[in-house]
Amino acid sequence: MKVVALISGGKDSVMNMMMCEKYGHEIVVLANLHPAEDSTEELDSFMYQTVGHNVITAFAECMGVPLLRRRITGTSLDQGLEYSATTGDEVEDLYQLLAYAKVHYGAEAVSTGAIASDYQRLRVENCCSRLKMVSLCFLWRMDQGVLLNAMWKAGVDAVLVKVAA
């Protein structure tokens, strides 16, 4: 499948892209949501990791893949575990970004590095469902020790800049 890879700059989103390629999927475009203000390094977001958003372009350059970026204009209005489309919610920024990737790059699936957050996973799946896309989340609920070992074996050279739960 043609895949739009959501990339935060973190090791998890990178590893999931590597898994997509391992299983025969094609990364056709990278996608990133970033703070509305360029001077903001990190948002207090329920949904997005924004630390390091200023180096995302390097990933696209290294991979030779186009990069779509969208400013996060919404806030986390619908904070329940189950999500319903809500005007002004930060998830709708993701929906718009994925819709663009589907129309302009033929993306059929979405790669995400979510491992343990039901909140994030369910929102990505909500967007995928509305857009008739497939969620590819190969790291979901993977044992952390197993995952770190797989990253090490795959040659992922990560530098920790933030730890989040």
Image (spheres, rainbow, N blue to C red):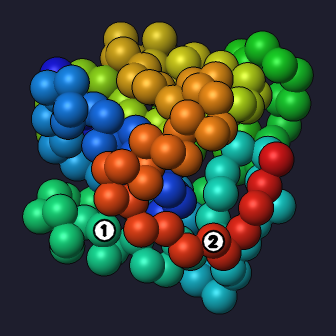
Give left or right: position of 140 versus 60.
Answer: right
Q: Percent position (x, y) of residue 61?
A: 20, 73
Q: For residue 132, what is the image quadrant?
A: top left
Would you call the spot at circle 1 few (<14 residues within 10 Å), some (14-19), or many (20 or more)?
some
Give left or right: position of 84 versus 129.
Answer: right
Is any part of residue 5 visible from this angle? no
Q: In the displayed image of the protein, which residue is found farthest to the bottom?
A: 39
Q: For residue 73, what is the image quadrant?
A: bottom right
Please state which of residues 45 and 131 is positioned toward the viewer in this rendering: 45
Q: Secondary structure at mark 2?
A: loop
The residue pinned by badge 1 equals 59
Residue under the point 71% across and 31% down: 116
Q: CA distance from mark 2 to mark 1?
A: 17 Å
Q: For residue 58, what is the image quadrant?
A: bottom left
Would you call the spot at circle 2 few (<14 residues within 10 Å), some (14-19), or many (20 or more)?
few
Q: Percent position (x, y) of residue 102?
A: 25, 31
Q: Percent position (x, y) of residue 93?
A: 56, 44
> Does 123 sit above or below residue 93?
above
- Nearest to the eye among marks 2 and 1: give it: 2
Q: Amino acid at mark 2?
A: Leu
> Does 82 sit above or below residue 72?
above
Residue under the point 64% across and 29% down: 143
The residue pinned by badge 2 equals 160
Q: Percent position (x, y) of residue 37?
A: 64, 78
Q: Amino acid at mark 1?
A: Phe
Give left or right: position of 35 versus 57.
Answer: right
